[in-house]
Image (tube, rainbow, N blue to C red):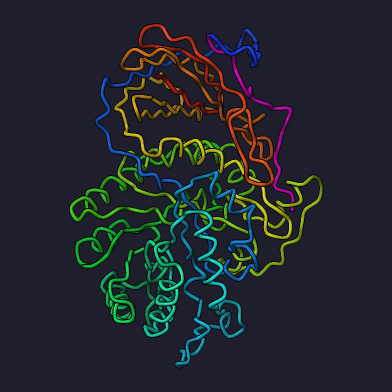
């Protein structure tokens, strides 16, 4: 399967000249008819916004990915490096649809009969083993990440859920952030084949939660891990005691929808950011963090030519910072090798390596929207989404600074933060037609300013995305290579932000 939709004849400008560009970067000259739109960004003098958690950027994988031999293993040094480069203090969520078809290999009690023909055919049910949990524990320790682990609720066997949770707690120890019980329970159906109500779900959840707490007193529980029901999150926050976090999922839309395009992805979703703010208020009343524990562009596995392109990098970085500013404490981007993702969607496929170069070959076995493509046998590479998340992660530990943006009709998003007297500004030009000449009023005097650029030859490019002029190498290593210097006059600077690109400015 070839993921690439790289229409080079429609190449966008990858990098544009700025005032005072470092000698190592040659500015790109635009045609006379490509004059840039003017925009202004003003920063407040002081940083009074919320502090961005160090674990803001994380990843989510299917529970069935535990069956991929060697994937989550302390011996998988390449994937460990990809995780640590993305975030040395991230959160890995293990769950997804397949968590509700997992059984614990050591459970000796009876299980209910398979509910449908697919289960009877062995399509869904599979066993998680002690060895897989031990490998996951070693992987978590090697990465420095903590884990949110989902156990089966749909099967409604509380003793089995309790045994698995106890084993996860015993082996992961401090690397376990929380156990979640059930995945997207808002989609469960009752005996009448109707979607269950929140009250039905809560009764189901409490049965398993009671068993888990009896097996492991004091174990950390989170939830409800709902798909698209903010009201369930609010009720869960109000009605459930003894939890350590709230969780919800997000997808922009469906991969098969007619309107699923790059333009749609980059149009943003202000309504959901408002939902995040309302959930954060509920969190704040109980001092609970909010995790967007399964997030990506489009459900049903993502769409080639959209979810795997530079557009996903711009969307992902913008989305993470918008949600952080609204009150989210973590964003876990869903992905991984293709086979388990397809099984999670009731599609049984046997992915094979693609044709062409290293990245094209790996595309054939990789999730369409995954941030890290590849597997243990073929190797890995960073997809565009990884770079957008990596840009957003630079804000970790900083405090948001209030901004005022005059975009003059251009599809721009901007965020500012401050850490140790150093200010950083991220600007995403999601416009597909207009470059921008942006003036930034920094809020106070600065001696110098530097900029990293997030670029690719085209908005639909898959394989040539870079941050600060550098790609993540096949071993998961990355460091900035091309850093531009901007002229600062008093408390202001200016730079060009080409269409379909992003910049990260550091001023001090």
Residue 294's spot in the image, x, y percent? 45, 56
Residue 66's spot in the image, x, y percent? 57, 68
* Residue at x-position 34% and y-position 47%: 328
Mostly what secondary structure, the magenta segment?
loop
Q: Is residue 75 above or below residue 11?
A: below
* Residue at x-position 69% and y-position 27%: 10
Residue 50's spot in the image, x, y percent? 28, 38
Q: Is residue 174 above or below residue 493?
A: below
Q: Is residue 95 above or below residue 488?
A: below
Residue 501 part of the magenta-drawn span: no
Residue 65's spot in the image, x, y percent? 58, 66
* Residue at x-position 44% and y-position 76%: 167
Work out which quarter of the rendered image holds the N terminus and state it.
bottom right
Q: Is residue 123 above or below residue 305?
A: below
* Residue at x-position 42% and y-position 20%: 507
Furthest residue toward right? 356
Q: Is residue 374 left or right of residue 414?
A: right
Work out which quarter of the rendered image holds the C terminus and state it.
top left
For residue 418, what is the image quadrant? top left
Residue 6 part of the magenta-drawn span: yes
Q: Is residue 288 left or right of residue 23?
A: left
Towards the viewer: 508 or 328: 508
Disc tally is: 0
Towards the viewer: 156 or 373: 373
Which range is magenta?
A: 1-19
């Amino acid at each position: 399967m070839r993921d690439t939709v790289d229409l080079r004849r429609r190449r966008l400008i990858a990098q544009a000249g700025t005032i005072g560009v470092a000698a190592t970067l040659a500015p790109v000259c635009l045609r006379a008819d490509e004059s840039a739109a003017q925009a202004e960004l003003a920063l407040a003098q002081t940083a009074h916004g919320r502090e961005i958690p160090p674990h803001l950027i994380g990843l989510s994988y299917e529970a069935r990915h535990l069956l991929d031999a060697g994937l989550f293993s302390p011996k998988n040094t390449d994937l460990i490096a990809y995780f640590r480069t993305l975030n040395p203090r991230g959160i890995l969520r293990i769950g997804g649809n397949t968590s509700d078809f997992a059984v614990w290999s050591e459970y000796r009690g009876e299980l209910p009969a398979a509910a449908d023909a697919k289960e009877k055919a062995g399509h869904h049910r599979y066993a998680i083993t002690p060895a897989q949990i031990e490998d996951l524990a070693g992987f978590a320790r090697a990465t420095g990440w903590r884990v949110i682990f989902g156990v089966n609720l749909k099967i409604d066997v509380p003793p089995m859920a309790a045994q698995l949770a106890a084993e996860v707690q015993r082996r992961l120890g401090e690397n376990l952030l929380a156990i979640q019980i059930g995945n997207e329970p808002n989609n469960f159906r009752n005996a009448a084949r109707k979607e269950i109500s929140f009250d039905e779900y809560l009764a189901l959840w409490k049965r398993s939660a009671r068993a888990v707490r009896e097996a492991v007193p004091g174990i950390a529980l989170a939830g409800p891990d709902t798909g698209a029901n903010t009201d369930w999150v609010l009720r869960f926050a109000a009605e459930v005691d003894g939890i350590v976090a709230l969780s919800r999922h997000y997808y922009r839309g469906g991969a098969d929808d007619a309107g699923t395009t790059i333009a749609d992805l980059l149009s943003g979703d202000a309504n959901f950011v408002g939902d995040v703010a309302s959930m954060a208020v509920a969190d704040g009343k109980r001092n609970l963090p909010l995790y967007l524990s399964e997030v990506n562009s489009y459900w049903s596995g993502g769409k080639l030519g959209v979810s795997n392109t530079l557009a996903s990098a711009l969307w992902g970085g913008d989305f993470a910072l918008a949600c952080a500013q609204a009150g989210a404490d973590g964003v876990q981007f869903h992905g991984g090798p293709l086979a388990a993702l397809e099984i999670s969607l009731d599609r049984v496929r046997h992915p094979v390596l693609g044709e062409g170069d290293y990245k094209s070959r790996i595309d054939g076995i990789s999730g369409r929207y995954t941030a890290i493509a590849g597997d243990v046998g073929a190797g890995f590479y960073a997809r565009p989404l990884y770079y957008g998340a990596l840009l957003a992660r630079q804000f970790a530990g900083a405090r948001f600074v209030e901004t005022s943006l005059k975009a003059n009709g251009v599809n721009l998003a901007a965020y500012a933060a401050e850490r140790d007297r150093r200010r950083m500004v991220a600007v995403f030009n999601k416009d597909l037609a207009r470059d921008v000449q942006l003036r930034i009023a920094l809020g106070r005097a600065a001696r110098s300013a530097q900029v990293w650029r997030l670029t690719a030859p085209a908005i639909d490019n898959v394989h040539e995305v870079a941050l600060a002029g550098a790609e993540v190498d096949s071993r998961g290593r990355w460091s900035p290579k091309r850093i531009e210097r901007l002229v600062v006059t008093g408390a202001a600077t200016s730079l060009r932000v080409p269409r379909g690109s992003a910049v990260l400015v550091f001023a001090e």
